[in-house]
Amino acid sequence: MRVLVTGAAGFIGFHVAQALLARGDSVVGIDNLNAYYDVTLKQARLDLLSAHPHFSFLHTTIADKDAILPLASTGLTHIVHLAAQAGVRYALENPFAYGESNLMGQLAMLELARAVPHLQHFVYASSSSVYGGNQKIPFAITDPVAQPLSLYAATKAAGELMAHSAAHLHRIPTTGLRFFTVYGPWGRPDMAAYLFAKQISAGLPIKVFNHGQMRRDFTYIEDIVGGILAALDRPPPDHGTVPPVALYNLGNSKSEPLLHFIHVLEDSLGQKAILDLQPMQKGDVPETFADITASTQDLGFRPTIDIETGIPRFVAWFKGYHG
């Protein structure tokens, strides 16, 4: 397989590219190495990938169709589209970044998929954020997603609709994956595990929203990568009557209290946290919880790593990376 991985210098993209290379696939990575978070971390991930002889890299933004579309003639067989402007809160500061990356970028990647001869599968990242104001727990793929609480969520839901239309019009086998709070080594500094670890280690307070009354379906990166590769290897069939599309939740299927997550992190770091309890932030939700019935049935997706195992692994990497 020759796989295009967008966001290859990002957290999930880096791990997916590593896993593909490890099993013998060749990988073309794309990333714009933007400054949303520490570029040094992105470059360190990229340096590890670049040491592999079957990895090549294109430094560009996914919304640049003039740079993206020529890849159609490079022998691609699969696309794993993970690049996006992430973050719920950052959309309040820079909304246009979400329009460019998550909407125009999704369109450019779908047009690339359309142009690749005999593309076998287009897999793309969605998010648990699409469930928005839903009150039913756990979140199932059949639940409505027409009540987004953030611009980020709205762009991810729009991306799912765009992918569905491309599958219908151009018969592109397409699978969307709704990720639930992914953490682990080489993680994103703006997400809870990394952000909290950094603040706790420095003896600084951590902001805990909704006065700590939050629950999240924390999912370890190794489990997520297993789900992505399982999906990639199982394109939805095209029987001609309906579009060849699939949609799955990838989560740990366990909703953990945020305060318990913090306690496990404290134990792993050997240091107590100073809690700065804050009200709920705009665009956030009090709980996420994945119903993974479909992904277990269709993909064999069965997460095995709980936070009591995953957080110490993350902390070991964190301490090693930061010396």
Image (cartoon, helix red, strand yellow):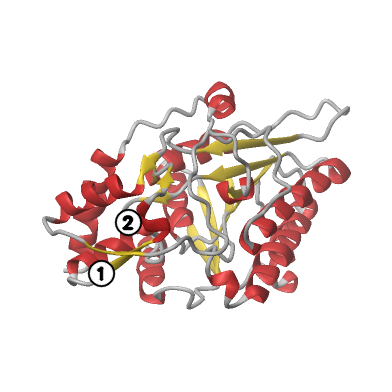
Dividing the picture into quarters, in which one does residue 110 lie?
bottom right
Name the mark nearer the viewer: 2 or 1. 1
Image height check: is 177 above or below 53? above
Count of numbered circles in the view: 2
List the residue tagged with mark 1. 205
Type of residue at label 1? Answer: Pro
Where residue 307 sits: x, y (%)?
29, 41
Where 92 falls versus 105 (above or below)?
below
Q: In this view, does 191 lie to the left or right of 199?
A: right
In the displayed structure image, the side of residue 219 where residue 238 appears, left or right = right
Q: Quick check: 8 left or right of 65?
A: left
Query: In terms of image quadrants, where is residue 240?
Result: top right
Which residue does the image show at 47% across and 60% down from the upper left?
Answer: 280
Q: How crowded is mark 1: few (under 14 residues within 10 Å), some or many (20 or more)?
A: some
Residue at figure coordinates x 53%, y 52% from the top left? 285
Residue 97 falls left or right of residue 205: right
Residue 229 versus residue 35 in the image, above or below:
above
Secondary structure at badge 1 equals strand
Residue on which disc 2 sits: 193
Residue 79 appears in the rendering:
no
Q: Pick the quarter of the image with the C terminus.
A: bottom left
Q: Distance between the residues labelled 2 and 1?
A: 14 Å
* Residue positioned 35% across, 62% down in the render: 48
